[in-house]
Amino acid sequence: MKKFLLLCLSFFLLISVSQGQNGIISVKSSHSVQATGDSLVKVLNSKGMTVFARIDHAKGAKSVGKKLRPTQLVIFGNPKIGTVLMQCNQEVGIDLPQKMLIWQDANDQTWISYNSPDYLVNRHNLKECNGKIIAKIKGALKKFAEAAAK
């Protein structure tokens, strides 16, 4: 029995670590997907971000006769910041502009998910890039998500 419990604990830890390494940060929202998305767009606009697009994946699914829980993607950015990252490694442009996914899970809980700046630093070898810029991006994304989720 002791070995079984140890095996289960090891498996749980392995799953937790791999989920944490997927490069995605998720913040729980107390509102619907639509209301959270509306709030996020307001926050982004108030902070001087450019909102390039808002994509309703559930609406797209419905248009082809499929069902999908509410899911929206907001694409936004600031060329002053993104350009600095691309000057460090132009390939980071594949992950820019920034995106936040607002989605509803199987338990009707709404989440805001976005790429961790640390993940992008590692993925695109931006370690030598301006550390202040990375810290600023981390703080801004966290604040945007938390403000939209309240």
Image (cartoon, rainbow, N blue to C red):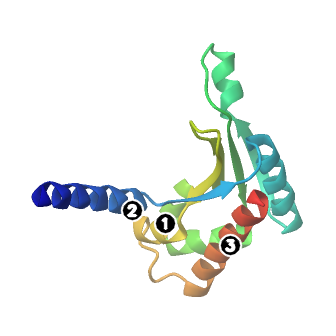
| Residue 81 image label | 3
Residue positioned 83% across, 62% down in the render: 43
Answer with mark 1 or mark 3, whichever residue precedes in sequence: 3
Is residue 137 visible in this depiction of the protein? yes
Residue 147, image quadrant: bottom right
Residue 71, image quadrant: top right
**Residue most extreme to the front:** 1
Task: Assess whether mark 3 and mark 1 are in contact (beta carbons under 8 angstroms).
Answer: no
Q: Amino acid at mark 3?
A: Ile
What residue sits right under mark 2 in the picture?
21
Vertical placement of residue 91 versus 36, above or below: below
Instruction: Find the distance from the CA under tag 3 to the CA under tag 2.
Output: 25 Å
What residue sits right under mark 1 in the picture?
120
Camera-side mark, 2 or 1: 2
Residue positioned 75% across, 45% down in the render: 53
Q: Amino acid at mark 1?
A: Leu
SS of the residue at dot 1? helix
Residue positioned 39% across, 56% down in the render: 19
- Residue 22 falls left or right of residue 109: left
Place of residue 131 in the rendered image (x, y in percent of width and height, measured from the top left) = 55, 85
Answer with mark 2 or mark 1, whichever residue precedes in sequence: 2
